[in-house]
Image (cartoon, helix red, strand yellow):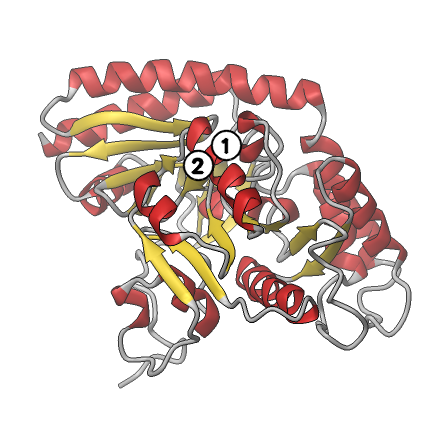
Amino acid sequence: MISHVLPTYNRAPIAFEKGEGAWAIATDGKRYLDLGSGIAVNVLGHANPDLVAALTEQAGKIWHVSNLYQIPQQERLADLLVDHTFADTAFITNSGTEAAELAIKMVRKYWHEKGEDRIEILTFEGAFHGRSTGAIAASGSEKMTKGFGPLMPGFRQLPWGDMAALKAAISDRTAAVMLEPVQGEGGIRPLPDADLQQIRALCDQHGALLVLDEVQCGMGRTGRLFAHEYAGITPDIMMVAKGIGGGFPLGAVLATEAAAAGMVAGTHGSTYGGNPLACAVGARVMEIVADDAFLAEVNRKAALFRQKLEGLVAAHPDVFEAVRGQGLMLGLKCKLAPTDLVKAGYAQHLLTVPAADNTLRLLPPLNITDDEIAEAVARLDRAAASLA
């Protein structure tokens, strides 16, 4: 008999009723050190006082009015996003998948308005852009696309990091190149800065748009506000979500004025997107995370965490191969199924997230403490020892 909750997840037998910073407290009272952060969502930890205050203040005023009216909180968030990025404009969504859908529409509308029949978007194997029919068509993963009938046409997947394949595929008929600067679901795989610079140059050479998906790697996760900043390039369109709401459902599409020119009144909409409640929280997240001193601390903690993880890999050569990633978006490449380590972590009251390419994802809140980093590695050490 089917469960009342549609069984599309293999859920762990743990339920949480409270959270405090990097800790999630289960219904049985056990405290778990959370290195998953709701899959890179809770960038400031659980029940962050600043976010609780922003949410509570706005909740006592007004929650929803619809985009038929001006929404000051939405304008505030858009101002912050534009002021801190390459973008000239922003559309606020409720999720990363919604952001991906708009990004795809924006690309196609751009070329339609130019009177050019360009629809092909080049993407990369291992990508994850969401679970709508358009987003799964973009990723091309058989696991996600199988059984869902004809997919949205116009996408072509290339091998991850294969610049020769990209050079051969891109042409004056290419509408856009879309990619994650650091693949998350694909196994914490950063694209080298030189490759990202070359992709930008190829897009410029052929007039194609560059679309970056920073849903998982953005919002300070890599030690910069957005991961592409390391390469010194800018996209034409960027998808943001997860961390931008600090736990509240929120996303955004950022774009240059040129890329967004075709998206006039009536071309896109959202009932809940940009609601006052979500935007009040998102604005507070931006104020905290975009601060240079905060990002400097992320980098310091990332170096500490990585150093300790390198020691962990050396101590368990039968379990781990290497550490990879950037900032506090780290992965442990494993010699066994990462799901085994996730389960072993439960026994140590530790929460981690599996990924493709035999990788265990470590995505702690960006304000995790040094002591909590040490405790996390100690628990990972015990989990690995139990599997050796």
Q: Nearer the viewer, residue 288 or 63?
A: 288
Amino acid under disc 1: Gln
Asked whether, in this view, residue 58 is left or right of residue 384, the answer is: right
> Residue shown at 80%/68% (left/top)?
64
Instruction: Name the quadrant containing residue 226.
Output: top right
> Residue shown at 39%/50% (left/top)?
28
Amino acid under disc 2: Leu
In this view, 124 is above or below 268: above
In this view, 299 is above or below 190: above
Asked whether, in this view, residue 278 is left or right of residue 175, the answer is: right
> Residue shown at 73%/66% (left/top)?
262
**Where residue 307 sits in the image (x, y, percent)?**
35, 13
Q: Which mark is residue 351?
A: none
For disc 2, the marked residue is: 363
Q: Quadrant of the N terminus?
A: bottom left
Q: Nearer the viewer, residue 121 or 212?
A: 121
* 2 or 1: tag closer to the N-terminus: 1
For disc 1, the marked residue is: 197
From mark 2 to mark 1, how far is it between C-alphas? 26 Å
Residues at discs 2 and 1 in contact (Cβ within 8 Å): no
**Where residue 76 sits in the image (x, y, percent)?**
85, 48
Asked whether, in this view, residue 136 is left or right of residue 345, the answer is: right
Viewer-side label of 2, 1: 1
Q: Quadrant of the C terminus?
A: top left
- Res 161 seen here: no
Secondary element type, mark 1: helix
Secondary element type, mark 2: loop
